[in-house]
Amino acid sequence: MSLAAPAAWPGRQHWPALPVLVGLTAAAAGVGGAVVVGFLVAGASSAPLDWVELLTSPTWDPAGGAYGAAAMVFGTVAVSAIALALATPLGWAAAVAITELVAPRRRRLVRGGVELLAAVPSIVYGLVGVALVRPLVSDLAGVPGGDSLLAAGLVLAVMVLPTVVAVSVDALAGVPRATREAAAALGLTRAELVRSVVVPAARPGLRAALLLGLARALGETIAVFLVIGRADGRLPSPAGALAALVRPGQTLTTKLGGPEPVLAGTSGTHWAALSGLGLILLVTVAAVTLVALRGSRRQGVGGGRRLDRAARGWSSRHRRDRLVAVARRGALAVPLVLVAGLVVVLVTRGSAALDPRFWLTAATGADAGGVRDQVAGTVLLVAATGLIAAPVGLGLGLVLGEYAGPRLSGAMRTATVTLGGVPSILLGLAGYRVLGTGLGWGKSWLAGALVLAVVVVPVAALATTARLDTLDPLRRESALALGLHRSQLIRSVLLPHAGPGLATGLLLGLARAAGETAPLLFTATVFSGAAALPAGVVDAPVVALPTHLFALSQDASRPAALEAAWGSALVLVVVAGLLLLAATPARRRLEAAG
């Protein structure tokens, strides 16, 4: 006799309120992505646009009617190439060290230490670039001020490194233990086992790590904006490409993050060209993300090269093994040293934040006072974002994990990951045009929260779906055997089980949202003059830590502004860090309750 009960027992009909709400919240997530794409397509179609000129000409001169983005494309490629050239080999070697050399009991701690780099808001990296990287480039390359493509690439390398490490560790850990044991039984040293068996088997995942790192580099705006110099028309000849790296430049994101999108109006060729830049950026990031996801899913067992040499020259091979292990441990030390160095720099230079009065005093003038109102504005934005993103992320997660079939679920998961990879500057521009201009809200804290919710929802939804995937099928079958409807199954079984995943994803997403700068510049914040707690929605901006730090970083040549910037950076890192630290105990409490 089957234990499964019919979907609805006779005489027990219920209005499907929960499925309707789930569908509505999932549709809201889809609307967010559709608005961004539709906004860019409509903008690019608002006036005749010469796409050939846009892609091939280096001249960007709105006053003269010339709209060529070739120099920006070169800048984007250059800074991304520098970042990946540094971060990829270091990240791969560090990932191998974590999976193959670090003791299992310490592995999670070491990996968490490396991934702390990902928790640092991009505006803080921008400040580090302004205060430390630019002077370094200036001294080494003789560049006045240090603004250059090289400085931007160095800052991006540190930002990309934790992405490469995290994805690579997952890929290497996915190689079956039996494969490792079989190779070791043939007499391979550890280094040979990694080179001949583990790395070939994990190659699709390692390639995905590189591509996801590239997507991260392509979409970064604020940190690059502060150190690249933002010079138009710098398209070098092939022979002068290397020399151009130590000169100021421009990328697609820095052009979109500057003042031009606000000055260009809502139509005309200038606005169409800027929208075209956004479309190029969006399509590129989406394509890279899709290729990375497809590659990571093809990971399988491979390798086996040079296995016939296992029995020859053991002594020399063993010495080489030790040298390789030392090199890999050295690569692992680099991100850990970067984390420690960043903490030391923030604590020593941001000592103002160690005084409670800095947190409790309002800012005065350009760089005096504290950050009381900025903290209040940031907390308001994060809280409102959480209230919006929690139900939408949960609804989308339930659709992905429960309602959608395997094929539809796979397509929707890919779309959700792609939405999570959309550069935040595009979200800010879309929010500015749709909410600020289209609905007449102007600068509004609610507009900022809605835009930040698009950043958080994919993280929360995917974490919820991953948690639902771990549900024991016996629990579902037992619930159905008791006669539960699907709505009752969701309320009684799925929601308690998915709670830890939702909480973790929501807190991780909010930690990222707390440090977002580019979307807030266009939608929600002003640099000064806003009330700590706005009274309404229309024309109700706030001051927030990320944009406050952005303003101070641009004026970092003055000691008072630089000192205030470091203090604000430490406060922002503390706020984001508290959200990350809250993820673990929140998850454990929900797991115990579920």
Image: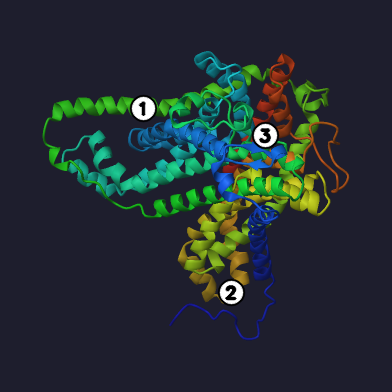
Q: Measure the alpha-carbon separation of dots 3 and 1.
A: 32 Å
Q: Position of residue 234 (x, y in %)?
A: 57, 30
Residue found 60% across the figure and 52% down from its top: 460
Q: Which residue lies furthest to the bottom in this view?
A: 10
Q: Which of marks 1 and 2 is in front?
A: 1
Residue where numbered disc 3 is placed: 575
In the picture, the disc for residue 329 is 1
Indicate whether 483 appears above or below 181.
below
Element at label 2? loop
Task: Please state which amino acid type lies under the numbered disc 1.
Answer: Arg
Q: In which quarter of the image is residue 56?
A: top right
Is residue 178 visible from the viewing direction of this image? yes
Image quarter hosting the C terminus: bottom right
Viewer-closest of 70 and 344 = 70
Q: Earlier in the sequence, mark 1 or mark 2?
A: 1
Task: Please state which amino acid type lies under the numbered disc 3.
Answer: Val
In the picture, the disc for residue 484 is 2
